Image: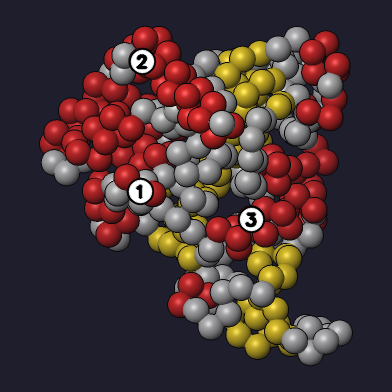
Amino acid sequence: MLEVVAEGSGPLFMDPDPDKAREFFRKKNRAMVSKVMSVREAVEKFVHDGDYLAIGGFGANRIPTAVCHEIVRQRKKNLIFAGHTSTHDFQILAAGEVFDRCDIAYIIGLEARGLSPNARRYMESGKVQVCEWSNYAMALRLKAAAMGVSFLPGRNLMGTDTFRNSAAKVVRCPFTDKLFVLYPALWPDVAAIHVHEADVYGNCRIKGISVADLELARAAKRLIITTEKLVPNEVIRQDPTSTVIPYFLVDAVCEVPFGSYPGNMPYEYFSDEEHLKQWLTVEKDPEEFRRFLDKYIYGVDDFNQYLELCGGIERIMQLRAQEHLILNTNRG
């Protein structure tokens, strides 16, 4: 029996029992079949009111924007959200008020761009129950789930207000008598991750940093993949070590070119800083922001129409040139 020395007072939104998670995964279909569908179909099928939702990417980099838009457009409600360095994705989901509980590590801020006025209003409204963590703590929670264990230890958060408002526990190590923080496993009901390439079965490739997405893919009970492009399975087989998310973890594959816009897709296109600034500006006036949402999310059928409103392929090509210029400059 581990001696519990201290424990946080925050709510635990997901049961860390590995055997309960195993019961779900034991019944999950892992057949190598085509999983191609539209984003609308994927959200209708796999995102349910009350689910625990996690979004891949990090900051505004490689985020599945199309899925976030569709969740708002379908007016999903009462979700629990993993705010693991969540910037524009959090901004979108807060605009639709789709979640009422949130594990928070980094939210509201869009990094150097500033704070989201609407997301801040929503979080200050009292409508959302929260539990506090750090980015590393959230990563350890996903890693524990990916490993099939109920917790992993760490040595951060002790002595902080973040620990006090978390659902973690400090225990005494039976081997060394030292103190460690235990982070409970997190198995999201559904996750969405945007990748560079995938085949129809869901074998995925990611260029650049993956942060916690490989653990998230293994922890999520249902996984929606959006991809810049579909590639033949033969291409995947030619270089199997490049597959970082295997097909048997994936439930839906949606081809969404430029699907991280207005965020950055490493090596593909830069973030649209002008459009992100537009979001931050219109949010200052709730009435103006409602009109903005009606135009850009509720008033369009899909993500392609949103892209057209934002400048379409011409704007994307400008952002692609900017990304390539930065890459070449860095190499120089």
Residue wearing tag 3: 139
Residue 112: numbered disc: 1
Q: Name the residue tied to disc 2.
A: 315
Disc 3/disc 2 C-alpha distance (Å): 34 Å
At which x and y percent is residue 319? 41, 21
Name above or below for residue 92 compared with residue 110: above
The image shows residue 277 at horizontal and vertical percentages of 26, 36
Q: What residue is at 79 percent from the left and 13 percent from the top?
A: 235
* Amino acid at dot 1: Ala
Task: Please say if the residues under marks 2 and 1 sit with CB atoms less than 8 Å apart.
Answer: no
CA neighbours of label 3 inside 10 A, class few (<14), some (14 to 19), many (20+)? many
- 173 sits left or right of 66 in the view: right
Q: Residue 326 carries which label?
A: none
* Residue count near mark 1 (Cα–Cα under 10 Å), binned few <14, some 14–19, many ≥20: few
For residue 178, what is the image quadrant?
bottom right
Q: Please indicate, yes or no, whether residue 151 appears anywhere in the rendered image.
A: yes
Name the amino acid, label 2: Arg
Q: Are marks 1 and 3 in contact (CB under 8 Å)?
A: no
Of the two numbered discs 1 and 3 on the same chain, state the one appearing first in sequence. 1
Q: Residue at x 78, y 28 (%)?
A: 242
Secondary structure found at label 3: helix
Left or right? Give the position of 1 relative to 189. Answer: right
Give the quadrant of the N terminus.
bottom right
